[in-house]
Image: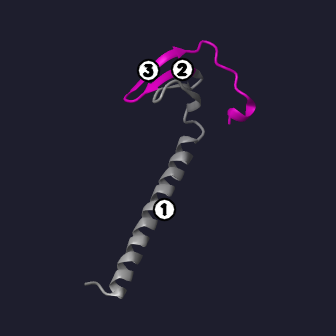
Amino acid sequence: MLGAGSLLQVLLGLVVVLALIAGAAWASRRLNRLRLGAAGSGLRVLGGLAVGARERVVLVEVGGTQLLLGVAPGRVQALHVLATPLALPEEERK
């Protein structure tokens, strides 16, 4: 049998491990967001629209070219390359 002191020590250890996992997940998301949003990456998601339960249409800018992509589980397909890029409001360009 475990005594009250041993049980408390195990619970505190569990809380510390869970806090470390949560901190690592937060830091990972934060670093990825900074890395992906860096100037000069040349790739931006401009918008998206759900067209089904698990299917989406996504507008992506690569360099100066805008692509319309169909995204489904296990598949991404280029639907159209826009000859004239869509004009975006100022707040979305950043």
The residue furthest left is: 1
Nearer to the camera, 77 or 5 = 5
How far apart are labels 1 and 2 at the CA level? 36 Å
Q: Residue 6 is drawn in which quadrant?
A: bottom left
Q: Residues within 10 Å of mark 3 (few under 14, many from 20)?
A: few
N-terminal of the two: label 2 or label 3? 2
| Secondary element at image label 3 | strand
| Secondary element at image label 2 | strand
Q: Which residue is mark 3?
A: 77
How far apart are labels 3 and 1 at the CA level? 36 Å
How far apart are labels 2 and 3 at the CA level? 9 Å
| Point 36% across, 86% down: residue | 4
| Point 54% across, 36% down: residue | 41
Q: Which residue is mark 2?
A: 68
The residue furthest top is: 83
Disc 1 marks which amino acid?
Answer: Gly
The span shown in magenta is: 66-94
Decide if residue 66 is on the left or right side of residue 24: right
29 vs 58: above or below: below
Q: Are marks 3 and 1 in contact (CB under 8 Å)?
A: no
78 vs 25: above or below: above
Q: Which residue is mark 1?
A: 23
| Point 49% across, 16% down: residue | 79
